[in-house]
Amino acid sequence: MRAAPAVSVRCTGGQSWRAMQASPPALASGAVGTWALLQLQASAWPAAVPLLLVAVLAWRRAAPRQTLLAWVGQRWPADGVVGEHAVTIDVDAGLLLRLRPAPPAAPRWIAVTAAEAGLAWHGLRCAAFWQPRAGQAAEAAGQAAE
C-alpha cells in the first residue's frame, strides 16, 4: 500500500463546529437558571434572559479560528506545531481531529469540513486514516524529505 499523499488545508470547522462549541454553556446556563427559578416557585420564562445572554456570549467566544493543517509524510503540522493525530469523529461532510503535540502543549481539536477542504478532501481523509505498515514508516519519511 502506498503512503498517503501530502496535503494541506486551511480550515475553521464551519458554522456547525461553532454551534457545537457554543451550545453546552448556553444549555447549562438555561438549565441552572430554570432550576433556580423553579426552586423559588417563580415562572420559568425569565430563565430565557440568561440563556439568551450566555448563548450570545458563547457564540462570540466560539468565533472561527483558521488553522493550516497539513500532512507531510509522517507528521501533522497544524499552524507549524507538529504532533500525532487521532480521528475522533468522521461524518461524510467533516472530520474532527485531535492533535497531540509534544508533552508541554495541550491537545488541540481541529474540525475540517469537506466544503473547506475542496479538492483536497479525499487526500486529507486518506492521510487521516493511513496507518503505516512495518517498513513503510521509513519510506514515508524519505518521501516527505524530498
Image (cartoon, rainbow, N blue to C red):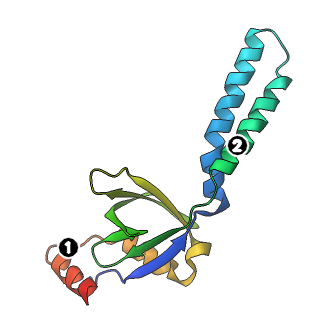
For marks 2 and 1, give the CA distance. 47 Å
* Percent coordinates x, y for residue 59 in the rendering: 69, 48
Is residue 91 visible to the viewer in this orientation of the structure? no
**Kind of residue indicated by mark 2:** Leu
Image-based side of 137 in relation to 47, left or right: left
Q: Element type at marker 2?
A: helix
* Percent coordinates x, y for residue 29 in the rendering: 68, 30
**Residue located 50% across and 81% down the image:** 120
Q: Element type at marker 1?
A: loop
Q: Nearer the viewer, residue 22 or 91?
A: 22
> Which residue position holds label 2?
57
Vertical relation: 122 (above or below) 107: below
> Which residue position holds label 1?
133
Q: Which mark is residue 5?
A: none
Vertical relation: 1 (above or below) 54: below
Dividing the image into 4 quarters, which one contains the N terminus?
bottom left
Callout 1: few (<14), some (14-19), or many (20+) C-alpha neighbours within 10 Å?
Answer: few
**Front of the two marks 2 and 1:** 2
Image-based side of 111 in relation to 88, left or right: right
**Residue located 71% across and 18% down the image:** 35
Quarter of the figure with residue 136: bottom left
Image-based side of 46 in relation to 89, left or right: right
Dividing the image into 4 quarters, which one contains the C terminus?
bottom left
Q: Nearer the viewer, residue 111 or 92?
A: 111
Callout 2: few (<14), some (14-19), or many (20+) C-alpha neighbours within 10 Å?
Answer: some
